[in-house]
Structures are given as structure tokens and as C-alpha cells.
Image (cartoon, rainbow, N blue to C red):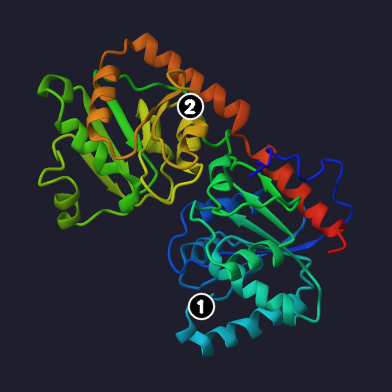
Amino acid sequence: MVLAPSHQAISPTHRMRKMMNILYTNFHVAGGGGHDVYIRTLLKQSTHRTYVACPKSSYLYQSLMRDNVANVLALDFPGKLSQSVHLVTQLRRLLSIIEAHQIDIIHTNGSADNRLVSYARLLSRRPFKHVFTKHNGFPVRGSISQWRFLKANHAIIFVSQSIYQSIGFSVQSDKIVVIRNGVDTDYWRPPVTVIPSAQIRLVSIAGTSGYKGWHYLINALKLLPASVRSRFTVTIVGTLPDRATRLERCRGDWLAEQVTFTGFLAEPYSVLQAADIGFVLSDAVETISFACREMMSVGLPVIVSDFGGLPENITLGIDGWVTPVGDETALAALLHQISALSPTQLTQMKQQARCKAEREFGIESMIEQTHQVYAWVMSSTD
């Protein structure tokens, strides 16, 4: 496989020539995690007429409506054959949206919405371009799925190099481009006043889904001598795991005396202001991680697992650390090393994390490259 460079497959000479109508889709019926952040980021910086289609039950729909964002449309994306009647209903609704709003580009973000939009391309009286962002590292399996992947999309965006490498079949195409996710480094900024602490304050805003690996950190802490373990506190932001889940994943003890689960926070920035080091220890699904980049932008070096695109964020030992996925013994050894850092060393790593974010993680590059993709597909004859 020939790896697609960061943004060379789409020529930077292509620029927007006219206002376009762009429809973003998100299939999640509840929280969409990084998909939600991705779409919100593109909406925030768009110079075009934008629309969002997603299930009415989704957090994205509800939050956009709460924020009075215009042009939010309720649409489901059935994914099972048993939902054929509902699928036809939603396909008709999608076709009416395309016609009513004169959609030029539909930008899909998952298999279910990509599939429905592919059907719409075959039936729509209005021709439109189809851009797909692949947010996960699951291989594209099966000849039909691989055909649809390449033929039903005018452009395919991967949010990390590792996702491109994990596609699962050999492919070379000028449709493919790697555009890493960007974050708002002005919003995610270091605190003006640093709150001192005698302890090392670990934090994650990556969520509490099972694959996020928060339990590996807790179990690793339990492997440390009590004198070393007491150096750390842990704050985990995300939907509160029930007691049974915490007991199971942490093998009977989640260190309640030093580990705090905050529950879901719509605005977790304040939690990061009183922290020293972030962590994202995912063992599945993860791509480049908005959460990792947000924490580094706030000036936190981050501990990441060597899964997916997570290591692409880190300069080892300079602005963070990489640990083998799921290896609690290796993680405990790393925490032991971190406990010996001097305040000056930790401060230097914090500064380096912020410098990396300012240099590489800003939304400006992500937006510019994505708009170049739009211009490219609009100029293509396919």
C-alpha cells in the first residue's frame, strides 16, 4: 500500500469559487463522541451554507438545537435489513432534503449514513458530491463494502495515518487524503493561574467507554508501592460507570479514595485547569483522539497507549509517553518513573505539550484542507 501524505492527494491550488450547500450527517442515536466534535468544528469555521442531519435522539441534534444552530434536520440512518421499511422512509426524507436545500456536498461520518447517502446518489434527481470521513480503525471487509468504499465516495478523509494503514485491503486512489483532527487551541488553553499541588494529578476527558482503558490506569496504580501510589490523584470525565462495571474492570477495587469519576461534563475545560498529566489508554476503536489533543492544548503531557493514531500525537519523553496497550505492568513502571519527575521537568513537559498543540493541532489546518477537498470534488467530473 502506498500511504497517502497528509494533504498532497488533494491539490492546494483548488480553492472555493462559490458558496455551496453542505450537508453533514451523523448516524449516532445518542452521543457521537469525536464525531460530534468533528462536525461542530467544521460548522464553526464554515463559510458555506451548512446543514446537519442526525437522529433527533442524538446528543448532537439536541445540543445544536439548544445552541440555536440553524439548519439542523432530524434524520435516522437504519443499518439493519429488518429495518427496511424505516430505511425507505428515511431515504425518501433524505432525497427531499437534498432537493429542498439544493445540496452540493454530503459529508458522511460513519458506515450507516454513508450507506444511506450512497443509495440517495443512485436515486436523487439532483447530482451531488459525496465526501466520507473514516473515524475508526476497523478494516473495510467484503467485496461489496470495498467497492462501495471506493466507488460511492468522491473523496475519503482519514483522520490519522494509522487508520489509513488499517483499511484492510490494498488501494491507491487520488480520492484518499489524511487530514488529522484539529482543536480550538484558543479555547483549550493553559490556565492563567496554576493551582499548585503536592500530588501529580492525572486526568482523562476521553470518556468511560470500556475501550477507553481508564481501568488499566487504576489497576496499574494498585501495582505500585503505597508510598508511590499516594503521589497520584486521578480524575476521569465521562458517563459514570455503574458500580458493577467499576468492580469488574478494576478487579474489586477502583481506589475510590484517590480516583474521582465526575460523570458527563459538557464543558470539561475547568477540570483540566487543575491537572498535571492527561491519559488516553484505549485498546480499540480510537483514532487520533480529540481528547488527547485538547488536553495537550491545555498544556498537559499525555500518557497514551500504542493503539491506533494515539502515538501520532506524542514526541516520546518530550510532551508525553507511549505505553503498550493493556499492559498494566508496563504502565505501573511508567507511573513509577513519572513519580520521580521534578516540578521543573514536569513544567517543561507541560510547556512542550502546549507548543506542540499550537504548532500542529490547530483547527485552521484541518479546516483549510477539508475545504480543499470540497473544492476538488466540485471541480472533478466524476
Q: Quadrant of the C terminus?
A: bottom right
107 lies above or below 276: below
Q: Which residue is mark 2?
A: 190
Q: What amino acid is at disc 1?
A: Pro
* 271 to 198, vertically: above or below: below
For the residue labelled by badge 2, is the local secondary structure a helix, a strand or a loop?
Answer: loop
Q: Amino acid at mark 2?
A: Pro
Query: Viewed as shown, does residue 12 lie left or right of 30?
Result: right
Local secondary structure at mark 1? loop
Near-viewer residue (158 or 185): 158
Q: Quadrant of residue 366?
A: top right
Q: Residue at x 34, y 50 (%)?
A: 211
| 145 or 312, nearer to the observer | 145
- Residue 20 in percent (x, y) is at 81, 61
Please state if 41 lies on the left or on the right of 340 as rendered. right
Pointers 2 and 1 in contact (C-beta within 8 Å) = no
**In the rendered view, would you say 203 is above or below 141?**
above
| Residue at mark 2 to residue at mark 1: CA–CA distance | 42 Å
Q: Earlier in the sequence, mark 2 or mark 1?
A: 1
* Residue 206 at x, y percent in the picture: 39, 44
Residue beneath disc 1:
78
